[in-house]
Image: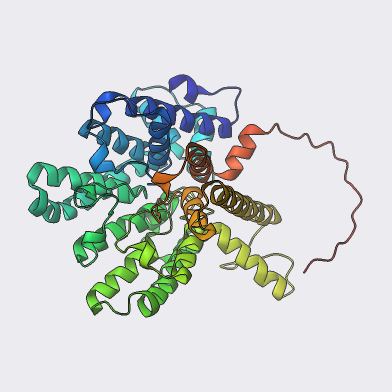
Amino acid sequence: MRRLFNGYGRSSFRVILLGFISVILAGSLLLSLPISSRSKQLTPFLDALFTSTSAVCVTGLVVYDTAEYWSEFGQLIILLLIQIGGLGVITVAGAFSILSGRRIGLMQRSTMQEAISAPNVGGIVRLTWFILRTSFAIELIGAILLFPTFCSEFGVLRGAWNAIFHSISAFCNAGFDLMGVKAPFSSLTYYAGNPIVSLVIAMLIIVGGIGFLTWNDIHTNRYHFRKYRMQSKVILVTTGILIVVPFIYFFIFEFAEEPLGRRILLSIFQSITPRTAGFNTADLNNISESGQSIITALMLIGGSPGSTAGGMKTTTIAVLVASAFAVFRHRSSPQLFSRRISGDIVFQAATILVMYLSFFFVSGLIISRMENLPILDCLFETASAIGTVGLTLGITPQLNSISHMILILLMFVGRVGGLTVIFATLTSVQNIGARLPQEKITVG
């Protein structure tokens, strides 16, 4: 990890890419060991790779039920991978470098800046410490709030382990759970009417998904919303809209037959969890195709930049919507909160949209054709993978090796970021100053 973090001669994007690959491979080797499974047998490497990728990329898609298949050691490895993947491989590596007393050079600071989407290099070490302290504090609070419920069901030690595991998994937007002891792959459906579990998990998902820089803004400026960065304002408003609108739909159409209290909890949870969390308190197979389509769209959007979440990001959607309004109003550039958005950002947002939709749709078609499964079910799984969500209609464990490799690739791209992968793998193009002739083309 030290040689990786030094990374001189390589771009920050390559360091980030190689960092995630290294942790995924290390986790795969550990999970394939006999000690990691309850049966004390070697786990096939592809299955271990799938689980490790899902954990590091904080997705939650699994080929084995976490509680039933993996031993306590295996569950601990998965939890460590979730924590590293949620905070970011580079952030964790930077923290170890700081603790060891090593000087953090400009290259390392630049890599840390890219990893958490910070606006500048200055103050990056202080921001890293803030992220670590805040993350561990929130996870601890979440575990304390969950402990009474799990303690009453599983006893003190097992209840504490469940509380810690689910708090970290929720905050990191991973979606891994240990409720397979009730029924395999049941997630949190047994707690659909439990306000403590439903609301605590939902709040951890939101806090983990809004981004580290947004926390810093809230910590610094408190209730003075006008002083927030424009990005923080966009994230908070967009996140609020993406929670309220689906909540209204689920409340009116999907859970109308449930008692009022349970109906509210189900609607809240299903409006929050699709944007990269992966827990569910309702059987998704019983939700209508319209509801599943809304969940699929939310999974593709994902969380916010510099957070524990994946997906296209809330800011990407906000920029694209602002661009559309700019065209409607004949403006030269989009605006958000009285600030102009540069053309480069619009180009990047459009590129990300095309990339994610292409990966999502083509992968779904391939899996549907190979597995002879309904296309909507396969698109649900591919959206879950590239959005690093983990929600499933139950088909992932039954897929063949090629389909699992496709999902592994989607999870990796969804967590690391499509542009990061492109910038890391493609050689830079030298700008020689020449420009091609311009000609108009009619669109729309």
Query: What residue lies at 59% left-to-right and 54% top-to-bottom?
Result: 361
Residue 40 appears left or right of 347: left
Viewport quadrant of the C terminus:
bottom right
The one of 90 and 415 positioned closer to us in this rendering: 415
The one of 103 and 352 positioned closer to us in this rendering: 352
The one of 6 and 294 positioned closer to us in this rendering: 294
Coordinates of residue 171 in the picture (x, y in percent): 32, 50
The one of 184 and 159 positioned closer to us in this rendering: 184
Q: Quadrant of residue 196?
A: bottom left
Residue 121 seen in this snapshot: no
Viewport quadrant of the N terminus:
top left
Query: What residue lies at 52% left-to-right and 38% top-to-bottom?
Result: 402
Q: Quadrant of residue 292?
A: bottom left
Coordinates of residue 180 in the picture (x, y in percent): 24, 48
Residue 255 appears left or right of 107: left
Coordinates of residue 149 in the picture (x, y in percent): 13, 56
Taking 54 as reference, is 219 above or below it?
below
Taking 232 as reference, is 87 above or below it?
above
Scheme of image coloration: rainbow
Coordinates of residue 173 in the picture (x, y in percent): 37, 50
Residue 359 seen in this snapshot: yes
Query: What residue lies at 70% left-to-right and 31% top-to-bottom?
Result: 427
